Image (spheres, rainbow, N blue to C red):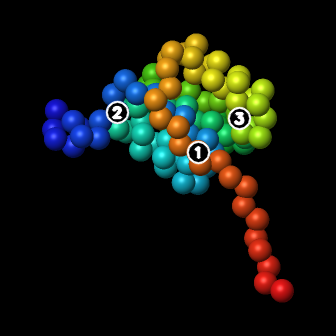
């Protein structure tokens, strides 16, 4: 184990990335898995969750859980937590990446 692994290794940790299936969230998901974390790819885009999770599962077997998540719904959040607890029994890292962006037009 090298010094970077000792400093930045996330083996055994569980991370949830909201908005984790697309854009920068997808890169957070991949980087966390690459550092050894078990990663929950949580996103409202069902197709993107499936695509990103399947791709990451091939590279990081046993480390990825894809969950359809609407961060504006308490029930959806509770269900995500239930699934994470059932799968890994813990949650160590939360990346609150989900957001809605709109284009502002100058007047």
> Which numbered disc, 2 or 1, marks the residue closer to the eye?
1
Q: Residue at x 66, y 26 (%)?
A: 80
Q: Residue 7: x percent and y percent?
A: 24, 40
The residue positioned farthest toward the right in the image shown: 107
Mark 1 to mark 3 CA distance (whole Å): 12 Å
Helix, strand or loop under label 2: loop
Label for residue 96? 1
Q: Residue at x 47, y 35 (%)?
A: 93
Q: Which sits in the foreground, 68 or 50?
A: 68
Q: Residue 17: x percent and y percent?
A: 56, 40
The answer to which quarter of the image holds residue 54 is: top right
> Which numbered disc, 1 or 3, marks the residue closer to the eye?
1
Helix, strand or loop under label 3: loop
Q: Residue 33: x percent and y percent?
A: 42, 36
Pointer 2 with pointer 1, Cβ within 8 A? no
Q: Which residue is mark 2?
A: 10
Label 1 neighbour load within 10 Å: few <14, some 14-19, many 20+: few
Residue 57 in view here: no
- Among the two numbered marks 1 and 3 on one chain, the one whose residue lies closer to the N terminus: 3
Pointer 2 with pointer 3, Cβ within 8 A? no
Q: Which residue is mark 3?
A: 69
Mark 2 to mark 3 CA distance (whole Å): 24 Å
């Amino acid at each position: 184990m090298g010094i970077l692994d000792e400093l930045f290794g996330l083996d055994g940790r569980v991370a949830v990335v909201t908005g984790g299936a697309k854009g920068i969230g997808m890169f957070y998901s991949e980087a966390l898995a690459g550092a050894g974390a078990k990663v929950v790819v949580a996103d409202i885009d069902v197709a993107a969750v499936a695509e990103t999770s399947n791709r990451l599962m091939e590279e990081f077997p046993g480390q990825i859980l894809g969950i359809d998540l609407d961060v504006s719904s308490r029930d959806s959040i509770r269900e995500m937590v239930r699934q994470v607890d059932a799968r890994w029994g813990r949650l160590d890292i939360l990346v609150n990446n989900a957001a809605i962006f709109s284009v502002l037009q100058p007047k």
